[in-house]
Amino acid sequence: MMTFGYSTILDFLSWVVVLSLGLKVVATLVLLTVSKAVWDRPGWGSGLWWASKITPVVAVPCIIGIAWMQKLTDQLWLFGALMLLVVVVVPLKIRQRRRRMANRTSAGTLA
Protein backbone atom coordinates (compact mmCIF):
# COMPACT_ATOMS: atom_id res chain seq x y z
CA MET A 1 0.00 0.00 0.00
CA MET A 2 2.67 2.55 0.95
CA THR A 3 5.68 3.27 -1.22
CA PHE A 4 8.97 4.80 -0.12
CA GLY A 5 10.61 6.39 -3.12
CA TYR A 6 11.16 10.07 -3.72
CA SER A 7 9.27 10.87 -6.90
CA THR A 8 5.48 10.62 -6.51
CA ILE A 9 2.80 12.02 -4.22
CA LEU A 10 2.26 8.50 -2.87
CA ASP A 11 5.91 8.42 -1.83
CA PHE A 12 5.58 11.79 -0.11
CA LEU A 13 2.42 10.78 1.75
CA SER A 14 4.02 7.50 2.80
CA TRP A 15 6.99 9.34 4.27
CA VAL A 16 4.68 11.79 6.08
CA VAL A 17 2.77 8.89 7.64
CA VAL A 18 5.89 7.03 8.74
CA LEU A 19 7.65 10.09 10.13
CA SER A 20 4.61 11.46 11.96
CA LEU A 21 3.68 8.12 13.51
CA GLY A 22 7.33 7.55 14.39
CA LEU A 23 7.34 10.91 16.17
CA LYS A 24 4.18 9.90 18.00
CA VAL A 25 5.71 6.65 19.22
CA VAL A 26 8.91 8.34 20.41
CA ALA A 27 7.00 11.16 22.11
CA THR A 28 4.66 8.71 23.83
CA LEU A 29 7.52 6.52 25.06
CA VAL A 30 9.35 9.52 26.50
CA LEU A 31 6.18 10.86 28.13
CA LEU A 32 5.46 7.52 29.75
CA THR A 33 8.76 7.75 31.63
CA VAL A 34 7.96 11.09 33.33
CA SER A 35 5.11 12.31 35.53
CA LYS A 36 2.06 14.13 34.24
CA ALA A 37 3.27 17.30 35.94
CA VAL A 38 6.12 17.45 33.40
CA TRP A 39 3.62 17.14 30.55
CA ASP A 40 1.81 20.29 31.64
CA ARG A 41 4.79 22.57 32.29
CA PRO A 42 6.18 24.68 29.46
CA GLY A 43 9.16 23.11 27.75
CA TRP A 44 9.96 19.79 26.14
CA GLY A 45 7.28 17.85 28.05
CA SER A 46 4.52 20.06 26.75
CA GLY A 47 5.93 19.94 23.22
CA LEU A 48 6.09 16.15 23.27
CA TRP A 49 2.54 15.97 24.64
CA TRP A 50 1.27 18.12 21.77
CA ALA A 51 3.31 16.09 19.27
CA SER A 52 1.69 12.89 20.51
CA LYS A 53 -1.78 14.37 19.99
CA ILE A 54 -1.34 16.24 16.69
CA THR A 55 0.54 13.59 14.70
CA PRO A 56 -2.52 11.33 14.19
CA VAL A 57 -4.38 14.36 12.85
CA VAL A 58 -1.63 14.65 10.21
CA ALA A 59 -1.04 10.94 9.52
CA VAL A 60 -4.60 9.63 9.11
CA PRO A 61 -5.62 12.00 6.28
CA CYS A 62 -2.40 11.04 4.50
CA ILE A 63 -3.31 7.36 4.89
CA ILE A 64 -6.79 8.14 3.56
CA GLY A 65 -5.22 9.90 0.58
CA ILE A 66 -2.97 6.91 -0.13
CA ALA A 67 -5.92 4.51 0.01
CA TRP A 68 -8.02 6.82 -2.20
CA MET A 69 -5.30 7.18 -4.86
CA GLN A 70 -4.80 3.43 -4.96
CA LYS A 71 -8.57 2.80 -5.05
CA LEU A 72 -8.54 0.60 -1.93
CA THR A 73 -12.19 1.06 -0.95
CA ASP A 74 -12.24 -1.44 1.93
CA GLN A 75 -9.29 0.25 3.60
CA LEU A 76 -10.68 3.67 2.78
CA TRP A 77 -13.74 2.99 4.94
CA LEU A 78 -11.54 1.69 7.75
CA PHE A 79 -9.27 4.75 7.66
CA GLY A 80 -12.32 7.03 7.46
CA ALA A 81 -13.60 5.46 10.67
CA LEU A 82 -10.15 5.90 12.19
CA MET A 83 -10.23 9.60 11.28
CA LEU A 84 -13.63 9.92 12.94
CA LEU A 85 -12.14 8.39 16.08
CA VAL A 86 -9.19 10.80 15.97
CA VAL A 87 -11.51 13.80 15.48
CA VAL A 88 -13.46 12.78 18.60
CA VAL A 89 -10.63 11.62 20.89
CA VAL A 90 -8.01 14.34 20.35
CA PRO A 91 -10.26 17.24 21.44
CA LEU A 92 -11.37 15.19 24.46
CA LYS A 93 -7.76 14.64 25.51
CA ILE A 94 -6.99 18.34 25.04
CA ARG A 95 -9.97 19.30 27.23
CA GLN A 96 -8.87 16.72 29.82
CA ARG A 97 -5.38 18.28 29.91
CA ARG A 98 -6.78 21.79 30.26
CA ARG A 99 -9.01 20.65 33.13
CA ARG A 100 -6.05 18.95 34.82
CA MET A 101 -3.95 22.11 34.48
CA ALA A 102 -6.78 24.31 35.80
CA ASN A 103 -7.29 22.02 38.79
CA ARG A 104 -3.57 22.02 39.53
CA THR A 105 -3.48 25.85 39.33
CA SER A 106 -6.53 26.32 41.54
CA ALA A 107 -5.22 23.78 44.08
CA GLY A 108 -1.90 25.65 44.13
CA THR A 109 -3.57 28.97 44.93
CA LEU A 110 -5.63 27.44 47.77
CA ALA A 111 -2.66 25.85 49.49
Image: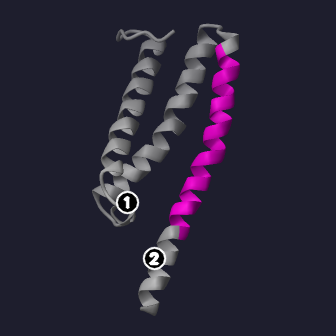
Which element carries disc 2, helix, strand or loop? Answer: helix
Identity of the residue drawn at 54% across and 38% down: 57
Q: Position of residue 41 (x, y in %)?
A: 35, 67
Q: Which mark is residue 104?
A: 2
Looking at the rendered image, the quarter that the C terminus falls into is: bottom left
User: Residue 92 lies in what quarter of the image?
Assistant: bottom right
Does residue 89 show up magenta in the picture?
yes
Q: Type of residue at label 1?
A: Trp
Q: Position of residue 65 (x, y in %)?
A: 58, 20
Q: Position of residue 11 (x, y in %)?
A: 42, 13
Q: Which residues are magenta?
A: 75-99
Relative to residue 29, is residue 3 depicted above or below?
above
In primary-sequence order, the first of circles 2 and 1 is 1
Which element carries disc 1, helix, strand or loop? Answer: helix
Does residue 63 show up magenta in the picture?
no
Q: Type of residue at label 2?
A: Arg
Question: Which residue lies under the disc numbered 1?
Answer: 39
Separation (CA) of disc 2 from disc 1:
12 Å
Dots 2, 1 in contact, CB < 8 A: no
Identity of the residue drawn at 40% across and 46% down: 51
Identity of the residue drawn at 63% across and 33% down: 83
Left or right: 80 with respect to 12? right
Relative to residue 90, is residue 97 depicted above or below?
below
- For the rendered model, the colour scheme is one colour
Identity of the residue drawn at 40% across and 52% down: 49
- Taken as a whole, is the magenta stretch helix, strand or loop? helix
